[in-house]
Structures are given as C-alpha cells and as structure tokens.
Amino acid sequence: MSLDTVKIATENPDTHQPYGQLGLKDDEYERIKSILGRRPTSSELAMYSVMWSEHCSYKSSKVHLKQFGEKAPKSDALLVGIGENAGVVDIGQGYAVTFKVESHNHPSFVEPYQGAATGVGGIVRDILTMGARPIAVMDPLRFGKADAPDTRRVLPGVVAGIGGYGNCLGLPNIGGEIVFDETYAGNPLVNALCVGVMRHEDIKLAKAHGVGNLVVLFGAKTGGDGIGGVSVLASETFNEEKPTKRPSVQVGDPFAEKVLIECCLEIFAADLVVGIQDLGGAGLSCATSELASAGSGGMKIQLEKVPLRDPSLSPEEILMSESQERMCAIVEPSKIDHFLKICKKWDVTATVIGEVTDGTRLNITWNGELIVDVPPRTVAHEGPVYNRPIAKPEYLNNLKEVSAKLPTTPDEIKVEILKLIASPNIADKSWVTSQYDKYVQGNTVLSYPEDSGVVRIDDKTNLGVAISTDANARWSYLDPYEGAKLALAESCRNIATTGAKPLAVTNCLNFGSPEDPGVMWQFAETVRGLADGCLELGLPVTGGNVSFYNQTGDVAILPTPVIGVLGVTQDVSKRTPMGFTKSGLDIYLIGKSDSNLSGSEWAHLHGEIGNQAPKADLEKESRLVKLLLDGQEIFESAHDLSNGGLAASLTESILAKKIGATITLSNPGNDLFVETPGRVLVAIDSKNSDSLQALSNKYNIEITKLGITGGNSLKVNETEISIDELNKAFTETLPKLFA
C-alpha cells in the first residue's frame, strides 16, 4: 500500500476509506472531513478512529460524568482531580497518594492471560506517570456462572495473568472481589486498581509545554500486538451473528515494566521531564494528541524514528499499536543527555521522535512526508458527544418480592448456612488469592480476606492507607441510583472497620451497550447516585473509567459500578482485624437489621432477585464511620456485613483464627441472611461495654449484643455447626471447580 500523505488526501478527496470497519459512524467521518477541510489521510483516520472510540472518548458518558465536577464536595485533601492519568490526594506528612481503577474486560475474554496481565500493566503505568512509586494493586473480578465451561477457561487464565504480571513487578495484591453471575458469561469484568505514593513536590502531569522541548519515546519497542485493541475492541459487543473486531490482544512483559518503573523514578528524582504520558489504549495516537492538547498545542513527530519490533508495520499500525511498557516524555534539550544516560543505565530503549512547536497543530511525518496535520484537541478532547436516549427498562415493571421460604427449624437453618457459605460468591477465595503475592515489599498490613487492604507508607510514623472496592450489581439492577450509593457506603464501611478515615473515591463503571436506552438509564442513574453520594459524604471523585458494550449479543451484564475508596490511617499498627482474636469477647451488631431480602445472595441462591433495593442512608453511614473511628481502641475485631449477611460475616470471623461463637437471635431465619446496609459485626472485651454504649448514644446508632466468642462451633439459638463443618463448606468450593 502506498503512503497516504496530506498532499494526496487533498488532491484525491473521493478515495474510499474503510471508516466503518474502524468503528466510525457516517456522521463522525463527515465531521472529521469538516474539521480538516478535506478527507483524512489513512494515518489521521487511524488516529481519529481509536481516539473517538467509546473507550477513549467517553462520547456517550461525558454528559453525565460532568456531575462529578458540578457536585464535587470541597476537599482540602484533593491535589489532582479528574482529567489526569490518575487523581492525587494529600495524606499528610508531605506524602501524596495516587490511585485509580480501570477495566480490561474485552481483551480478557479474548485472551484471558494477556488481557488481565496487560490490564495490570496499564493501570500501574497510569500511576507511574503521576510521578508515584506504585505500591499495591487490587483486582475486582466478575465471571459467568462458576460451573460454566467458559468460566473454567477464563477465570484461571485471568488469575494467572494478574498473578504472573503483578508478582513479577513485585507489587503486592491486597484485595478486590470475585463475583459470579450468569450475565457475565462471555463478558467477564477484569477491573484493575493501583495505588502509588510520592512526595507533594514529585507530582507529574501529562502536558507538552515549552517550544523546542523534545518528545521522547522510551521503554519497549513497538510491535503489532493490540492494534486497535482495547480502544476499538471495547466498543464492540460479542455477537455470534456478526463478525466482530478481535485484534490481537496486547502482550505484556512484566520484567520490562519493572525496569521501566525504576528508570522513570530515577528520571523523576532528577527532575528531567516537563510532562509524561503512558502509552496504553490508542498507543501513540493517544499519547501525542493528549500531550499536545493539554500543553501548548503544537507538536511535530517523525514517526519513522519509532523503534519497531516489527519493521513491516505501516504508519497507521504504528499509530494504533497498543504495545505495552511504553512511555512518552517531554524533555528540555538541556536535560536530554542526562535523560538518555539514565535510560541506558537501565537498558531502556529511548528515542527522540519529535519536538514541541509554537503552532496549534500536531504534525506527523514519515520519512519527510507529512501524513498527519490535525488540531490535537479535536483528536483528544473534542470528539463526538452523544446525549443518548434514556428509558427506564421494562423489566422494572415485572419485579416480584422474594417468595422463597426462610428456614425456621434448627436443621433447616444449618442447611441454609452451609449452602450459603459454600456458594461461589461467598466461599473462600484463597484458591485465587494464594496465586498473588500479598506481602512483597514488606509494607502490606492487611489483605484478603480483610475488609480492606492496608499498606504502610512511612515505616517511622506508621502512616498508611486503606483501599476497598465494592459493588452489589443486583442492587444496581433493581435501583441503579441507590445501588451506586450503597456500593459507596459499603466501601467506606470497609475502610472504617480497619481503622482508616475515608478520603477519596475512584470508580469503574461497567455497563452494556450505550445504544440501548435502558442501559443508558441505568448508567445515568448510577452516575447521579454516585455524585450525590460523594457530595453527601464529602468525598471527591478523583477519576476512573467507563466500560460500555459489556454484553453478549443483546444480553447486557448487570450494571456494575465498582466503587473504590481510599482512606488514611495515622498508625497502621493499630488496625482492626476482621476475625475474632480470642475467646470470651462480647459480640455486638452495630446497626439494625430489616427484612428486605431483595438483591441478597440468599435470594440469588433460590433463583430470585426481588423487587426493591434498600435505600441508602448516607447520613447514618457517615455517623457509623465516625463511631468506628472514634471507638477503634475498644474493638478487638470489626467486620462489615454485606454479601451473605450475618451468616457470612460470622463464618469469616470464626474461621480467621478458628475461634467459635455462641449467639442468640430473635428471628434467626431472617437475621442471618438479610443484607441490610449500614451494619458491622464487632467483638469487644466486656469491660468496654459501657464505652460502646456511650458511642451508640453519641452517634445515635443501634447496638445489639448477640453473644460471646469461644468454643469449637457456631451456635445460633438451637442450631450448632462445628468449625470443621464450616471450614469444609467454606473452603472446598473453588478448588473443586478450578483446581
């Protein structure tokens, strides 16, 4: 194929271009021509197609996401907000923390190992580009039914990819979620979160400032893997009835990334970059256009200088390639020798491929021929914006109350408890998490199965951060507005139970096709709920990710807004564990149980979902967080009640150290399985009962004494289950399915 230059495009306006195959609509193509005053070159078309894809442009979500800015609460902690590679918050003592969660769903279905691995690699580089040292990762995962054949293909590959890449990087994996539901069949959710730490003065931004400054590409060489990968692939549904774009998934090299991390941190320490951007989705198309757009606006690139693994790649393929472990930096000419010297020290390929100019155009040449001449903002930030049709889904008119009969007799209660804790969504996830290194770097304080992951930041003061991710997709299905608030509240509770104060929020919003009015209603209500919830709790949204087209054919996934909350603790040595620590402690329930089983795991096990999600009471949730933090000194253990309710929380608390419990419930059939939000299970020394009552009075939150720790079983009224029986039911499920 001959080179398509700007001159040729101008002189040959009627040349047919396969824009539809690249995911562009007719009107979008016409808009590109209007912007340029001519047809695009094939290289320009490649850039616009990947940057205007749903994944990169947020064209269907922008009109809703602006609420995070419009409703943003005042926050003294927020240092960098939405719009950069990741948000940054102040945690005190001169430290700043950056964190973000993103999706790598579609590539992980096509090629589970590499899809998941490169998802980890991509989010780590996002954190790195902020100037931070990555210190931990988390992975909220969702799969189809646990016993489905394709789940047996996808889950082991995803887990191996996450573990293989993260372990090689030397980053501890400190938590996440694993959920199974038939709607994720053929469309797993592989969300990846990374947290990094830096000093305030080390924050870096993705901007190309300073005329004459050099554009440097460094890291791995560019190959043909992932051409149009996450950018185009994530804007497609997997439909058996039509051909789908399935380009080769990006291939990751964790050892190259580990070296790149250390190289970058040394470069940052020497203050050698003006701006920096990683090459993830849309590759060079994204990095050059976003850097130029966020800076002075002018940039000139000599594309033939890009180091290639595959010399046969065309300019269009180079621009679209999503090869991993690559970075793009803006460097002053006076500092380039020092920059290249550090790269050489770490054996990292680094090449000057262009410079910042005083114009307003992004120009890219190929062996002296001009192949791209565009206003960079039109590529990176001024793509199409759609106000998609919204309609409340019909299914909401056909919902019914949970009709399954709750257990009443001791034998029935025993059967239901064992059935619940053996279900894949509740059962022990150690088969998965044991494949991850939780303790590398030596700063992990808490990790799975604790309510949140906790990492030490400063070993002298014990300053640390806690991170939790949560989502109840069934509640979001019943009421997406309340579902988002409830997920936010749960994540905050998980942070507070460990003794940390919630500080900021990230999110990964996973939905079906935005072209479906029902899906867009779910999305719009979710964003509204999350924005309102964050405003009420005073927590800023620092950034995140939207992942649309998560469906197989016409069947969309359950709306799944994964909400990540980061909290700060002044002394990680005082963290509160989840499990019962010794016998003879008093067990209390903080918060009040109701009888609504809609969206619960117990209902799900009985083939039902219900009709009414709980209403989030964020004012009360805020008081609960304050109670937990105020009373941290008296809690021997604290465990959030969420999926699986009291039955699951008691089981997990008992099995942590194999210490039993005896409790009394007024209505055990209901109280064990209901998932009423705003509840925490705590254990205290009896001498602190007055202090707990005082906290209850101070924050106006109900407390109920349930019983006492000790023994070799769980006793609930007349029902008794031995620790051995609990352990067998809880631990054998996943190994039987996947080992």
Image: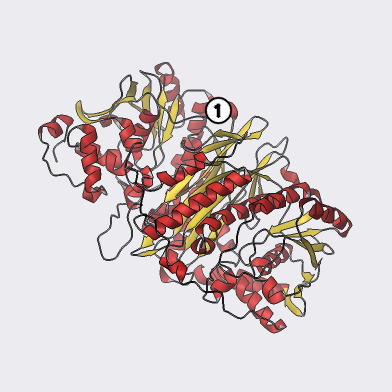
Residue 425 visible in this rendered orientation of the protein: yes
Q: Position of residue 698 (x, y in %)?
A: 80, 50
Q: Residue at x 55, y 36 (%)?
A: 88
Q: Which residue is mark 1?
A: 202
Q: Nearer the viewer, residue 375 or 115?
A: 375
Determine whether, in the image, residue 588 is placed left or right of residue 556.
Answer: right
Determine whether, in the image, residue 207 is placed left or right of residue 410.
Answer: left
Q: Position of residue 174 (x, y in %)?
A: 60, 51
Instruction: Specify how the rendered protein is coloured.
Output: secondary structure
Determine whether, in the image, residue 302 is placed left or right of residue 412.
Answer: left
Query: Where 263 falls versus 684 (above or below)?
Result: above
Q: Residue at x 29, y 26 (%)?
A: 361
- Looking at the rendered structure, the secondary structure element under dot 1 is helix
- Farthest residue to the top: give it: 334
Asked where in the image residue 352 lies, by quadrant, the reply is top left
Asked where in the image residue 681 lies, by quadrant, the reply is bottom right
Q: Residue at x 58, y 39 (%)?
A: 73
Tag 1: residue type? Asp
Q: Nearer the viewer, residue 415 or 480?
A: 480
